[in-house]
Amino acid sequence: MIPLTTTETSNRKRPPAMSDDLIFAMGKYEARIPTDRQYSKNHMWVQKTSTDSVRVGLTAYSVRLLQDVYFLEWSIDPNTAVADRQEIGEIESSKAVSSLHTPCAGQILAFNEDLLNDPSHINADTYEAGWLYEMQLHTDLLSADEYLQHLEQGWEKDQRLIKGQVN
C-alpha cells in the first residue's frame, strides 16, 4: 500500500509523486479519484475514449456507499438520447437497490455487456473493467479537484445518511 500525505483538509490526501490520483478519506476507507477524467455531482466518472464518445462509471466514493454490487439492469436501449440525470437503469447492492442516472444529457451508445453477467467488476475495478456505458455528451463536467471539493462539502451529510441519522 502506498503511504499517503495529507493536504489542505483532513479528508483530502494525495499519494506521493508516483500517482496523480487524489484520495478522499471516508473514515477508515479511501476513495481514489483519478485525475485523468471528469466527474459529475451524482458520483459518476467520465473518460474520453474518442473525439466524440466517453466511458461512464461509478466513482470509488459511490461504490463504497453502495458496498457489494451484485445486480445491474438497464431500462433503455443503446443509441438512445437521454436527458440530464435521466434514470436509465437500476443497480442492486448489499446496501440498497438504487436507480442509475446519467451524469448529463447526451446519447447512450453502448453498455458494458460484461457487467450484465458479472457486475463484480464494478466493485473490484470501477475505473477500468467496471465502466458502465459509453455515451456522447456535449458538456464539460467537474475536474478531479472540483469533484473532491464537492465530496468535502457533502461528506458530513453523507455520513449521517450512511448511519441512518438524516431527518
Image (cartoon, grey):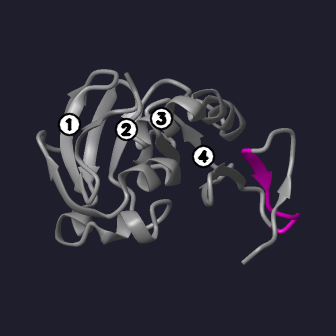
Give residue 126's position: percent from left, percent from top. 45, 61
Labels 4 and 3: the sequence-earlier one: 4
Question: Is residue 99 depicted above or below 122 in this figure?
Answer: above
* Magenta residues, start to end: 11-18
Q: CA distance from mark 2 to mark 4?
A: 32 Å
Question: Which of 20 and 78 lies nearest the eye of the viewer?
Answer: 20
Instruction: Identify the residue under disc 3.
Output: 160
- Residue at x 42%, y 35% (from the top left corner): 161
- The quadrant of the picture occupied by the C terminus is top left
Labels 3 and 1: the sequence-earlier one: 1
Q: CA distance from mark 1 to mark 4?
A: 22 Å
Marks 3 and 2 close (CB-CB < 8 Å): no
How packed mark 3 is, by other alpha carbons closer than 10 Å (few <14, some 14-19, many 20 or more), is few
Instruction: Identify the residue under disc 4.
Output: 37
Q: CA distance from mark 2 to mark 1?
A: 27 Å
Instruction: Identify the residue under disc 2.
Output: 164
Labels 1 and 4: the sequence-earlier one: 4
- Residue 4 in the figure: left or right of residue 31: right
- Residue 111 in the figure: left or right of residue 125: left
Q: CA distance from mark 3 to mark 1?
A: 27 Å
Instruction: Identify residue type, mark 3.
Output: Arg
Q: Secondary structure at mark 2?
A: loop
Q: Secondary structure at mark 1?
A: strand
Instruction: Identify the residue under disc 1.
Output: 88
- Residue at x 86%, y 39% (from the top left corner): 8
Instruction: Identify residue type, mark 4.
Output: Arg
Give residue 92's position: percent from left, percent from top. 21, 54
Question: Which of 162 and 84 lies nearest the eye of the viewer?
Answer: 162
